[in-house]
């Protein structure tokens, strides 16, 4: 018992001192995007998948690849295209010659890695997008009636282009809900863009040195789940998610007016889990309501569907979330 306590205490101390070191190492290749980096680290320590939304050329792919190097995780990039098939993602059965004669053998697809980058996921039809569902939820894939476990830890970090761009397929609601965060990657300020251009057109790029490994990350995830949280803070997360649902007894008028579909139970779960990780990285061992509020936009923006009236009036999902936060505080 004492050994377990001491191990967990050391893990907490290691995690609390990690943020500055991790960000310093990432800054060798990633300039700016502080908020996105912070949330990606929270996702890693919470064991959650992430969706990165932004126009092409904003270093979304480089960011995820750098993250895998930082944690010394195996990495696979899947370029989602209109002709990509589900078996191209998960793997397939092939007929193989052996000393015992011919037999069927499973050839693993690129999904079998610790960190999988699903690049431009909304460029491929829903049938192939759905191939990720089982892997993201169950950490295994099934082929020819047989289950194949994925390596641990396992993350899917998917990039997508804004839905207004040509040749995109909206992600199914069931798959969107599997992502812990939806992070918006925006254009950098001028000074940061100058720094990026100078760095990428200069000499040899700096390399990232691993600071942790997969075993340590799993230990971090276990400790994050054990962070104490008061019932009223959990209730705050539940109420925040529930208040986004239209046509219920407690629905605010603006939700009934602008929202077609609200957040489910998984939103509250991700708010609490992310808040626990945020508390630890901020050198706290307890969760505050402010931790829940800080994660409201990345957790809720892909779980709330605004209607045509909201779009006609220029009301965005982030505007709806801002009003929810104002009403719940």
Image: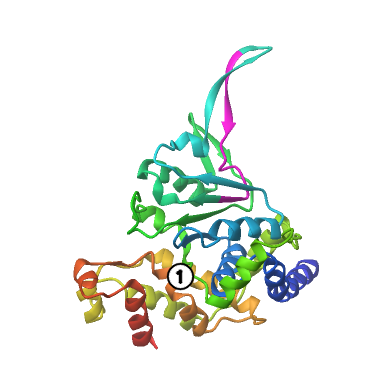
Answer whether residue 32 is visible to the viewer in this image: no
Residue 296 image offset from top left, x and y in percent? 44, 75
User: Is residue 328 in view from this perspective?
Assistant: yes
Look at 20% across and 75% down and name the residue there: 257
| Viewer-side residue, 220 vs 324 | 324
The one of 60 and 126 positioned closer to us in this rendering: 60
- Residue 266 position, x and y percent, is 43, 64
Instruction: State yes or no: residue 108 in magenta.
Output: yes
Question: How many callouts does the rendering have?
Answer: 1
**Is 63 drawn above or below residue 188 in the view shown?**
above
Q: The N terminus is located in which quarter?
A: bottom right
Q: Is the magenta stretch mostly helix, strand or loop?
A: strand
When asked about the image quadrant of residue 256, the answer is: bottom left
Say if 15 sits above or below 152 in the image.
below
Question: In the rendered structure, which segment of residues is drawn in magenta?
Answer: 102-116
Give the image location of residue 147, x and y in percent: 54, 36
Left or right: 31 in relation to 270: right
* Foreground pick, 190 / 228: 190
Coloured how? rainbow
User: What residue is at 20 percent from the left and 71 percent from the top?
Assistant: 312
Circle 1 Cα neighbour tier, 10 Å, few/some/many (<14 / 14–19 / ≥20):
many
Which x, y percent locates residue 192? 58, 74
In the image, 23 versus 54, the foreground residue is 54
Q: In this view, does 160 lie above or below 45?
A: above
Quick one: quadrant of the C terminus? bottom left
Residue 58 is left or right of residue 45, and the answer is left
Residue drawn where x is 40% and y is 48% of the image: 123
Circle 1 — which element? helix
The residue located at (21%, 81%) in the rendering is 253
| Magenta residue check for 130 | no
Q: Name the residue under label 1.
A: 298
């Amino acid at each position: 018992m004492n050994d377990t306590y001491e191990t967990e205490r050391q893990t907490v101390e290691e995690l609390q001192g990690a943020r500055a070191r991790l960000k310093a190492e990432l800054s060798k290749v990633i300039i700016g995007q502080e908020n996105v980096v912070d949330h990606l680290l929270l996702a890693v320590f919470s064991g959650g998948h992430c969706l990165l939304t932004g126009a092409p050329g904003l270093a979304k792919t480089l960011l995820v690849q750098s993250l895998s190097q930082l944690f010394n995780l195996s990495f696979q990039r899947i370029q989602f295209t209109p002709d990509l098939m589900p078996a191209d993602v998960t793997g397939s059965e092939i007929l193989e010659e052996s000393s015992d004669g011919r037999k069927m053998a499973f050839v693993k697809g690129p999904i079998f890695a610790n960190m999988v980058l699903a690049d431009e996921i909304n460029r491929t039809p829903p049938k192939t997008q759905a191939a990720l569902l089982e892997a993201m939820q169950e950490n295994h894939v099934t082929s020819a009636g047989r289950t194949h476990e994925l390596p641990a830890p396992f993350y899917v970090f998917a990039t997508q282009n804004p839905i207004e761009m040509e040749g995109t397929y909206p992600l199914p609601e069931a798959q969107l809900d599997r992502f812990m965060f939806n992070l918006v990657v925006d254009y950098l300020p001028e000074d940061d863009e100058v720094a990026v251009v100078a760095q990428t057109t200069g000499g040899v790029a700096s390399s990232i040195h691993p600071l942790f490994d997969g075993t340590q990350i799993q230990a971090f995830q276990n400790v994050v789940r054990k962070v104490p949280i008061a019932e009223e803070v959990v209730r705050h997360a539940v109420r925040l998610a529930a208040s986004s649902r239209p046509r219920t007894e407690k629905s605010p008028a603006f939700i009934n007016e602008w929202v077609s579909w609200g957040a489910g139970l998984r939103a509250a779960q991700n708010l609490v889990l992310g808040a626990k990780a945020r508390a630890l990285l901020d050198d706290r061992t307890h969760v505050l309501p402010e931790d829940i509020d800080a994660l409201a936009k990345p957790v809720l923006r892909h779980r709330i569907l605004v209607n045509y009236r909201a779009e006609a009036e220029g009301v965005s999902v982030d505007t709806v979330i801002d009003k929810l936060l104002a009403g719940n505080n």
